[in-house]
């Protein structure tokens, strides 16, 4: 079944092969097709393994990040995350071996080896992450051996990240590559003992707009120190202390569940899922942490904190809710964790979610998501612009939440937009983050620009094609 | 001229000043009417190129991918490329499909030209032109990718044509606003032309309440086909390497004389452009342009002493860098550092000539990264920089303000609207530059003077 639903006469917006990846909540009994390779030529919004690995590891602040390949991969990720650091700014530099034709023919290992030496001599970082790319994967550079030799030569961790882009178009595979690199980094060497501490690790938190610091403040008040976050505002030394924590809390599940399981296996550290996007999620997460901690005093302090912080924001959230009730929202983001968090927040603001989807969601995540949505909501896996446009128009959406590529699409259609991407500058976590999020949704949904630019009422002049 | 030797022996590129080769090719096909572009490589390549373009142009920029995975990387990407072409043709229905290759596709040795030829034959395609351009990033930057794609596209369409009056105009990677200004000047001078690539409307759409898979606008293919019959080619490509020069191709293959002009940035270069057009058209220069020239001259007088306080660093693609160097030199803000991420033979001579009135010769760094630029800026006492958003760390880490020009602009709005060419664009740029110096001056001169003359003297 093909539908001629696009403004471009005759051109289908949905390819046959993509039909299984678009379902409707409630009605559809069939399972969504997801976690498959992107269809060639479909203009997927997805990226690659390298991209996934690079964004997960980028916030390790005092490490050097060296991309082994021709220049493009490094250029495209040069300081692209809004992760903040309380100390070193090393992570914001982008290093590349900048392979040329000669290197591709004769091998890039000598250049990689010399490059590592150069970085060590200039910066003395405690660790270097070396990312492999498509080309170095294909020409068969032995990145692992070069890293091992450099590690011994310099007495620091030189960690290979196996992130050749062609392995998959799915960022999730890159998250795994990053997780493997992290596990390699933090596994104690023989004879090394990591001190046990009464603290938690915060996995899947990238300190965008200082979000880790917000949660850290809450936990401090509860009496629970954060040992280290994976990887927001982390340092190599702090990451190496990770095995000593008493509990792991996992936020961005797409990138960090596997790591949490590995840590449990290797060090016996239990983990719980948390989510600090939205007031309700924050409250439940804080209570879950207190419960896992099992200390009545911590529980008492937690309840005091929740009551106080929630009281502070209730009135403002109510104000925005009144303005936003009944507005129609769309969500298209990278992972299911984020989509689910946003669904919940928008529902708290009285909005109706009519379209949602992700680049990397899994079957069970889509099933859970579907349960949160009302009947008729369209769910798309690995969408492309043509599909997004079709449903944004068909569902008469007022506001969309997503990343940079979706932003311009929404604006072209005269639809409001909330940035929930890797390079955002605003803190959206915790109670204060919930208010900031609500404000951003209101600002864009109800902006005075829409009624003016969308108005069809007899403009004095028009352009061809508009 | 000083050589920054250190930058050349380095093994590591630290904070990139240039981008990858296929990215340059994308802009060219986006500037062709009814065209779509497909990147033959990993999914990530096309997504990154989309992201970069989206942030700069603030427009949806659809770029398809052949989404190569591990299996195709081992056994060859032909099947995926064909499937990608099928799907793009079905959904986008383009008349032109540009295929730019990536490092991966070139390394595994896919013969894209042959694949496309057999695909077209097999599918019996008659109403679409598929144009492959080899653009592996290990062989060049976005600059070479841009020129190579223009040349391939012209070579694909060019047909023997009786002589006609339309002048060929070939532009480098400039903003849609710049392209519009060049077209306006051509119109004012009464010159009929074919301009390539023309993404002035496709990459900068007036609001229309909808997204168009292939937005209207762009150079018409029937006009490209007629380029061999033109009286002359004006190419703003003084730094364009001969072997990929589209203008040189038209001259050598079709006998169209080539006039390689500098980008019309600044008084001298814009005068040269107008003079060239006057000779071609035989028409007088309209009063509008005379006024615009006069306003620019007036501003040059008003601002010259402020500009003399500038010690600028200029970085970016060679053609734009030379244009900016010219305008700054003629305004007495002599650049002290000139850098490009691109490997270039042509730039040194142009800079030498542009800076002939300067007291102090600028440092020139080709194949530069921002580590080299920062280091050289420190040494040269740079107090203002001109270039794309990549230089943001110069501001953050060294307090050097950046006047944003070029590609990509991702940390300010309106990259697509930055106007720098013609008398009007030159004046707009000059004001941005001078006011950046003045803003610095007003923010700091009281405190600095007090420190120097009062506190240090112990008064």
Image: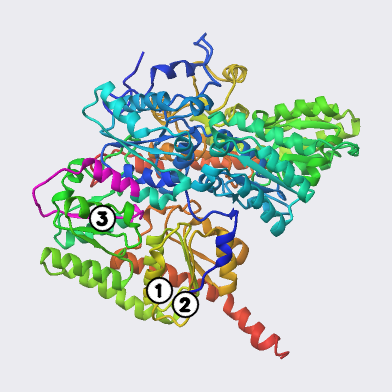
Q: Chain of mark 2?
A: B
Quarter holding the C terminus of chain B? bottom right
Q: Earlier in the sequence, mark 3 or mark 2?
A: 3
Which residue occupies 70% across, 90% down?
Answer: B457
Q: Is residue B38 above or below residue A81?
A: above
Is B174 covered by the magenta stretch? yes
Its colouring scheme is rainbow
Q: Chain of mark 3?
A: B
2 and 1 marks in contact (CB < 8 Å) = yes
Residue matched to label 1: B352
Q: Secondary structure at mark 1?
A: helix
Residue ranking furthest to the front: A106
Structural distance between the alpha carbons of marks 2 and 1: 8 Å
Residue placed most toward the observer, B209 or B369? B369
- Horizontal and vertical percent position of residue B38: 38, 35
Residue matched to label 3: B248
Pair 3/2: label in front? 3
Mark drawn on residue B361: 2
Same subunit: marks 3 and 1: yes
- Horizontal and vertical percent position of residue A131: 63, 41
Q: Earlier in the sequence, mark 2 or mark 1?
A: 1
The magenta region covers: B148-177
The answer to whether one can see residue B288 in this image is yes
Structural distance between the alpha carbons of marks 3 and 1: 24 Å
């Amino acid at each position: 079944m093909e539908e001629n639903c696009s403004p471009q006469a005759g051109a289908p917006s949905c390819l046959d092969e993509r039909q299984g990846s678009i379902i409707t909540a409630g009605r559809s009994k069939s399972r969504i097709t997801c976690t498959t390779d992107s269809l060639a030529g479909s203009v997927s919004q997805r990226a690659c393994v390298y991209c996934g690995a690079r964004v997960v590891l980028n916030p390790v602040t005092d490490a050097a990040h060296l991309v082994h390949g021709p220049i493009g991969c490094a250029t495209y990720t040069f300081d692209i995350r809004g992760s903040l650091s309380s100390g070193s700014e090393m992570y914001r530099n982008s290093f590349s071996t900048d392979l040329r034709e000669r290197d591709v023919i004769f091998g890039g290992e000598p250049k990689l080896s010399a490059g590592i030496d150069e970085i060590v001599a200039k910066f003395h970082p405690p660790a270097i992450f070396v990312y492999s790319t498509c080309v170095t994967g294909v020409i068969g550079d032995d990145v692992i051996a070069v890293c091992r030799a450099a590690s011994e030569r310099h007495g620091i961790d030189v960690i290979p990240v196996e992130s050749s882009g062609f392995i998959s178009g799915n960022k999730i595979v890159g998250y795994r590559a990053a997780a493997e690199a992290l596990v390699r980094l933090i596994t104690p060497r023989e004879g090394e003992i990591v001190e046990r501490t009464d603290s938690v690790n915060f996995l899947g938190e990238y300190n965008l707009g200082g979000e880790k610091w917000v949660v850290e403040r809450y936990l401090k008040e509860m009496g629970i120190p954060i040992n280290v976050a994976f990887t927001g505002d982390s340092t190599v030394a702090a990451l190496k202390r990770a095995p000593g924590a008493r509990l792991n809390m996992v936020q961005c599940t797409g990138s960090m569940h596997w790591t949490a399981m590995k840590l449990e296996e290797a060090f016996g550290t239990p983990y719980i899922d948390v989510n600090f996007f939205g007031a309700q999620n924050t409250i439940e997460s804080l209570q879950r942490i207190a419960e896992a901690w099992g200390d009545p005093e911590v529980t008492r302090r937690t309840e005091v904190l929740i009551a106080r912080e929630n009281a502070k924001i209730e009135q403002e959230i109510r104000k925005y809710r009144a303005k936003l009730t009944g507005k129609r929202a769309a969500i298209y983001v990278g992972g299911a964790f984020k989509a689910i968090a946003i669904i919940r927040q928008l529902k708290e603001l009285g909005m109706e979610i009519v379209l949602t989807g992700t680049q990397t969601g899994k079957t069970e995540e889509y099933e859970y998501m579907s349960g949160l949505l009302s009947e008729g909501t369209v769910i798309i896996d690995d969408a492309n612009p043509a599909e997004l446009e079709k449903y944004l128009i068909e569902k008469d959406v007022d506001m969309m939440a997503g990343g940079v590529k979706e932003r311009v699409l929404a604006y072209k259609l005269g639809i409001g937009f909330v940035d929930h991407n890797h390079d955002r500058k605003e803190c959206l976590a915790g109670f204060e983050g919930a208010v900031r999020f609500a404000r951003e949704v209101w600002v864009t949904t109800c902006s005075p620009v829409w009624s003016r630019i969308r108005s069809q009422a007899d403009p004095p002049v028009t352009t061809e094609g508009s | 001229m000083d050589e920054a030797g250190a930058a050349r022996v380095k093994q590591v590129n630290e904070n990139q000043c240039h981008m990858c080769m296929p990215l340059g090719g994308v802009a060219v096909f986006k500037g062709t009417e009814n065209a779509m572009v497909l990147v033959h490589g990993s999914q990530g390549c096309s997504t990154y190129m989309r992201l970069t373009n989206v942030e700069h142009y603030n427009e949806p920029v659809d770029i398809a991918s052949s989404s190569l995975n591990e299996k195709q990387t081992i056994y060859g990407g032909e099947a995926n490329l064909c499937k990608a072409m099928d799907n793009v043709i079905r959904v986008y229905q383009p008349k032109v499909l540009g295929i730019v290759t990536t490092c991966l596709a070139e390394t595994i040795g896919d013969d894209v030209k042959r694949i496309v030829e057999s695909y077209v034959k097999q599918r019996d395609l008659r109403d679409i032109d598929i144009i492959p351009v080899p653009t592996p990033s290990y062989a060049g930057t976005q600059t070479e990718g841009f020129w190579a794609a223009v040349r391939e596209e012209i070579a694909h369409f060019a047909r023997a044509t009786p002589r006609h009056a339309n002048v060929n105009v070939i532009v480098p990677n400039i903003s849609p606003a710049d392209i519009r200004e060049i077209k306006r000047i051509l119109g004012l001078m009464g010159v009929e032309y074919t301009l390539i690539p023309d993404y002035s409307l496709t990459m900068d759409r007036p609001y229309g309440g909808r997204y168009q898979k292939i937005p209207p606008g762009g150079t018409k293919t029937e006009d490209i086909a007629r380029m061999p019959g033109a009286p002359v080619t004006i190419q703003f490509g003084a730094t364009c390497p001969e072997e990929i020069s589209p203008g040189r191709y038209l001259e050598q293959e079709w006998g169209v004389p080539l006039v390689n002009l500098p980008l019309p940035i600044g008084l001298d270069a814009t005068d040269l452009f107008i003079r060239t057009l006057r000779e071609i058209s035989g028409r007088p220069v309209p009063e509008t342009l005379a006024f615009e020239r006069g306003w620019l001259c007036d501003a040059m007088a008003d601002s010259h002493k402020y500009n003399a306080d500038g010690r600028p660093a200029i970085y970016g693609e060679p053609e734009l860098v030379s244009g900016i160097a010219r305008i700054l030199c003629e305004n007495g803000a002599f650049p002290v550092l000139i850098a490009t991420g691109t490997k270039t033979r042509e730039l040194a001579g142009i800079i030498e000539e542009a800076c002939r009135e300067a007291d102090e010769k600028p440092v020139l760094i080709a194949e530069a990264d921002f580590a080299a630029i920062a280091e050289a800026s420190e040494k040269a006492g740079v107090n203002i920089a001109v270039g794309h958003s990549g230089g943001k760390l110069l501001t953050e880490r060294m307090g050097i303000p950046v006047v944003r020009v070029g590609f990509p602009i991702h940390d300010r709005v309106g990259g697509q609207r930055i106007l720098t060419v013609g008398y009007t664009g030159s004046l707009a740029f000059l004001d941005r530059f001078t006011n950046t110096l003045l803003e610095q001056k007003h923010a700091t001169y009281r405190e600095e003077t007090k420190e120097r003359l009062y506190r240090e003297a112990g008064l």
